[in-house]
Amino acid sequence: MLIRPRASLLYAVCVFMSFPAIANIEQEFDELDALLNMPLDSLAETKVVTATKTSLSLSDVPASVHVITSKEIERSSARSIADVLILAPGLHVAKFSDYDWTVSARSKNQGENNTLLVMIDGRSAINPMYSGVNWDTLPVSLDNIDRIEVVLGSVGTLWGGNAVNGVINIITKDAEDAPKAQVSAAAGNYDYKEFKAHHSGQLNEYTHLSGYIESLQHSPFTDEDPHFEELRHLKVLTERFGMRADYQNQQNTVSMQFGGSSSREDYQWLQYTPAFLDPASHQNDYDAFFTEMNSQELFAGFQYLHEKLDGDQWENQVWLTHSESDGTNEPASFTRLDLDSRYTFNTQEWGILTLGINARIIDEEYATFSQEEQYFSPYVRTIEDHEFLNQSYGIYTNWSINVTDSTEVTLGNRIQYANITEEWYSQPQVRALQKLTDNQRLWMGWGRAVITPSRLELDTQFQENSYCSSCAYTINPDGSLNYYDYMMSYHYLGNRDLKLESIDTYELGYRYWQDNQFQLSVSLFYSQHDNVRAYKGLGGNRYFTPDSSEHSSGTIIDDMFAQLIDPLSQETLGGEISAQWKPTDVLQVNANYSYKTIKGGCTGSICGSNELPILDLENTPNHYATLHIMWDIHPTVWVSSVVNYTSASEPDDALIAAYKDYGDDYLVWPEIITLDMSVNWQHKPTWPSIKVSAENLGNDQLKEYPEQFGSFANGTQYYAEISWNFI
C-alpha cells in the first residue's frame, strides 16, 4: 500500500486573558496595538496585478478577484498554502492525507487538475510531469507571503496555458518587508515538528536582502484506523530555503531570487515477483518493504521593471526551474526556462495598452523501464520518447479603453504556439467595467482559454498491475480443478488524436465598499467546456505460459487497455459572494459562499450505450462556504477561528446503481464541516510570541473524498508555535 496522496481552546483563551503579567504592561500597549490592529484596506486601496499584469485597484478590475492578505494567512491556523486557500471563494480544497491536497476552481476536483494555474511571483508552479501541483513541496514560506491573489474565470489572454478556470498567484514579500531576525519552532501531535529562520537587511541605500530556511517533519497521515498501526513510524520530511535581493533606484527596480525545496516521504511499497519469470526460486507473490520517495526543486529568477515618468512600464522576467522525482507515477526530471517581456503604454487619451511576448522551454527526461520492470510495481508511468524539448511561444495584447468617464472596455487576445502538437491557439477576451458611484462597480466579461497540451495525456502510458499465484482455476470433466497463477495489467494509454480542450466563460459581477469597514463582491458565471477527456475500453489480450509457481499448471496473463478520448463536454453554472466587515478596530469578519453545478454532455458513437461518464462528471459538491473571524481581544492576545463547509454531492441514481456492490456512499463526496482555531499571546514586542492552534475540531477522523478514491481520514491536530524576533 502506498502512503500518499485537526478539547476546546476556550480554556486556553481564559488562561491567556487572566495572565497576571498583563496588568503591568500598559506602557507598551501602543506599539503592540499598532502591530495587531492593521486596518482593512478598502477595495479602492487594494492593489492587484494578476488580473491585468499591471498594478490596479481591486475596485476597478473587471474580473472576479479575491485577495488573501498576510494577516489573514497568519490568523488562519493553516500550516500549508493549500489550507490557506479555503479563505477564497470559488475554490474547492480537499485534503487527501496529511500532505496531499487537490484544489479546483469552478470545476470538478481531481488530482491532475490542469484548468487552474498556480504561480509564485508569476512563475508557474504546475508540475508538467503530471499536470498538477505538489502543494506540500511548493518552494515558498508562509511567513514570506505578502498576499495571495485568486482570479476566477478565464485569464488565458494574459497568462496562457492552464489559466482556464482561474489563477492563484502567490506573491512574496519584498526583501525590505521580509521578516527580520525571526526564529520560530512548532510541535504538535502526529509527530509534527517545524523549524523556521528568517532574516532580512539593507545592503546599501538601494539594495535589500532577505533569506529563510525551513524544516518540517510530520506523519504522512492522521488516520487512526488500526490497519495502519504498523505504519505509525513513517515520516515526511520537507525542507525549503529561499533568498531574495531587491534593488530600487528612481525608475528602475531589479529583483533576483533563488530557492528550492526537497521532500523525503517514507512509505510502504511492494514489488511483485511473478513465478513465471523465475519458477525455481519463487517463494512469495510479492516482496513488501519500506522505502522512501524523493523529490526536489530548485529555481532562480530575475525581474526587471522600468517605470517611465509618463506612466509607461517595461517589465521583464526570467525564471529557471529544475525539478525531479523518483516516484513510479512521475519518474522524471525537467528543466524549465520561462521568459516574459511586456510593455505597458499608460495614456489618458487611449487608456492602458499592454503588449507582451513569452516563451517556455522545458527539457523533459522520463525514466526508462524494461518490459519486465513494468510488471513489477503496482503502478508505473512509461513513455516511448524519454527525452523531449517541450516548447511554447506566445504573443499577447490587452487594451483597456476609457469609453466615457464611467465606462471602461477591455479587449485582449493571446496567440500561442506549442510544438507538442505543432499548432497555434487563440485566447481572446472582452470585458467592461461600469462605475455606478464612487463606491460601486458593475462589471461583465467573456473569455476563451485553452488547456495547454501535455505529453501526459498525449504520449504516456499508466499501467496498474496485480498478481497472485494459484488463484485462477478451470474445472475438468471429472470435477477436479486445475490451478493457475494470474496476472492482470490495466494499460491507460494517451492519445495523439485528442482535440484541444477549450473553455468559454461568461461573467457578471458587482462590488460595493464602505470606506475601510465593509466590502462586498458578487459574481455569476457560466462556462462551456469542450473536448473533456474520458477513457474508452479497448478490450485486451490474454497470454498463457507454462511457467508458474509450484502448485500451478501455468500462468494466465491478461493485458487490458483503455485510451483517452474527448467526447464529453460540460456546462458549469454558479457564482460567488464574498464579504469583509470590520465593525470595530479589534474585530474583523470575512465570509464567502460559492455555488456551482455541472451539466455534462456527450457526442459520438460512445455516448449512446453508456451515460456513466457524464453522470460521473456531474457528481460534485454544489455548496461551499467559509467564515473567518479575527479578534484582538487584548493588545497582547488575539484569537481567530475558521469554519469551512462543503456540501455532500448527490450522485445520480443510475451512477449509484452501477456501483451498488461497493455501497451507497462509494461515490458520494461527503459533507465537510471543519473548525480551526488559534490563540496568540505576546507580552511585548521584544518578547517571543506563543501561538496555540487546533485544526479540524469536532470532526476527528473525517474523510474529504468519496470512498472510491481511498483517501485517508483526517484527525484533529493540535500544535504550539513559539516565534521570536531578535531585532
Image: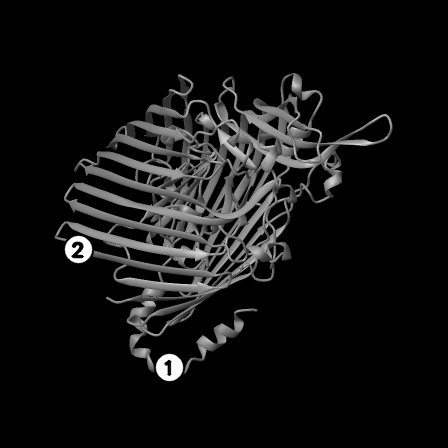
Q: Residue furthest right?
A: 478
Query: Residue at label 1?
Result: 21
**Quadrant of residue 212 within the rendered picture:** bottom left
Give the quarter of the figure containing the N terminus.
Answer: top right
The answer to whether residue 654 is above or below residue 200 is above
The answer to whether residue 303 is above or below residue 492 is below
Disc 1 is placed on an element classified as helix
Closest to the observer, 162 or 310: 162
Residue 411's disc number: none
Give the quarter of the figure containing the C terminus.
Answer: bottom left
Q: Residue furthest front?
A: 280
Residue 385: x percent and y percent?
A: 42, 22
Amino acid type at mark 2: Gln
Q: Earlier in the sequence, mark 2 or mark 1?
A: 1
Whether pointer 2 and pointer 1 mark residues with C-beta atoms closer than 8 Å, the reply is: no
Query: Residue at label 2?
Result: 202
Comparing labels 2 and 1, the label whose residue is closer to the camera: 2
The answer to whether residue 397 is above or below residue 691 is above
Please tell me which residue is depicted at 87% across the width and 28% down the height of the picture. Answer: 478
Closest to the observer, 608 or 405: 608
Residue 470: x percent and y percent?
A: 71, 36
Residue 579: x percent and y percent?
A: 48, 51
Disc 2 is placed on an element classified as strand
Could you tell me if residue 517 is visible in this image?
no
Amino acid type at mark 1: Ala
Please tell me which residue is depicted at 64% across the width and 21% down the height of the picture. Answer: 541
